[in-house]
Amino acid sequence: MELRVRGERAVLKGRGTAHAREIDPHSLAIGVELSDALHEWARVAAAVRRAQDNGEPGQAAAVVSRRGQQLAVQVADAMGTLVYYVDPVTDETLVVSPPPRQEPEPTLARRLFGTAEFGDEPTPWGTGLVVAGFVAAVVITAMLALTVALAAEVSGWLVVVAALVVTGGMAPSLWLARRLPIVRWIALGATAGIALSWFGVLAVAF
């Protein structure tokens, strides 16, 4: 994409095509504010160019060139493409790349359910172990309550089978959650609770 001044208007056109149509910035999805700024800059650049042609000192030429480069960076950012900025004062062409995109701050939902591990953050061992311990206590209580209730109605082997079904059903989810921030502490507690509850399950079943 090429940015240049035509008359007193800023225009953009595709590069690499000899007969590419010049486009008014207002017809592109770069925002009204940026489009107005481009045209305002073009009017000033045209006035500076006329002053230079009439032999008047061109102290404002450097300011116009610098402002045009700033606007070219904004256009490159808005469109996500290279912009060939044609300086209206010197007629030199400068290639402007879009600035690097900054990753947005992770939301709470992404922290809880996202797929990326945030390895640059400190590990909250204190809070995480407290959460894991609480979850482990809840899981142990639930498993033993289930085991005791089943032991009163069925044989010990069926109690073991039921515990195996519960353990197998939870295992895939716990494995997938092992690297997720925050959720991994819940997975750790649940895994520890299931492992420890098996001592009680075997004791009740047999």
Image: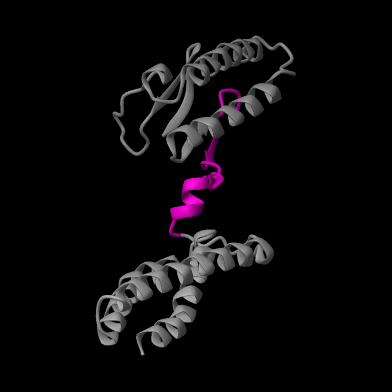
In the rendered image, the quadrant that contains the C terminus is: bottom left
Q: In this view, does 124 lie to the left or right of 156?
A: right
Quarter of the figure with residue 11: top left
Residue at screen point 58% across, 17% down: 41
Regarding residue 93, the answer to whether it shows in the image is yes
Disc tally is 0
- The residue nearer to you, when weighing 52 against 45, is 45
- The x and y percentages for residue 148 are 37, 75
- The residue nearer to you, when weighing 83 against 48, is 83
Quarter of the figure with residue 45: top right
Colouring mode (rainbow / by chain / secondary structure / one colour): one colour
Residue at screen point 49% across, 67% down: 179
Regarding residue 84, the answer to whether it shows in the image is no
Report the predominant secondary structure element of the magenta stretch: loop
Q: Is residue 150 left or right of residue 111?
A: left
- The x and y percentages for residue 164 are 31, 80
The correct choice, above or below, for 191 with respect to 48 in the image is below
In the rendered image, the quadrant that contains the N terminus is: top left
- Residue 90 in the magenta stretch? The answer is yes
Residue at screen point 61% across, 30% down: 70
The correct choice, above or below, for 151 with respect to 120 in the image is below
- The residue nearer to you, when weighing 95 against 154, is 154
Furthest residue in direction front, as rendered: 152
Furthest residue in direction bottom, as rendered: 206
- The x and y percentages for residue 162 are 28, 77
- The x and y percentages for residue 176 are 39, 68
- Residue 193 in the magenta stretch? The answer is no
The correct choice, above or below, for 200 with respect to 179 in the image is below
Q: Is residue 128 left or right of residue 197?
A: right
Quarter of the figure with residue 128: bottom right
The range drawn in magenta is 86-115
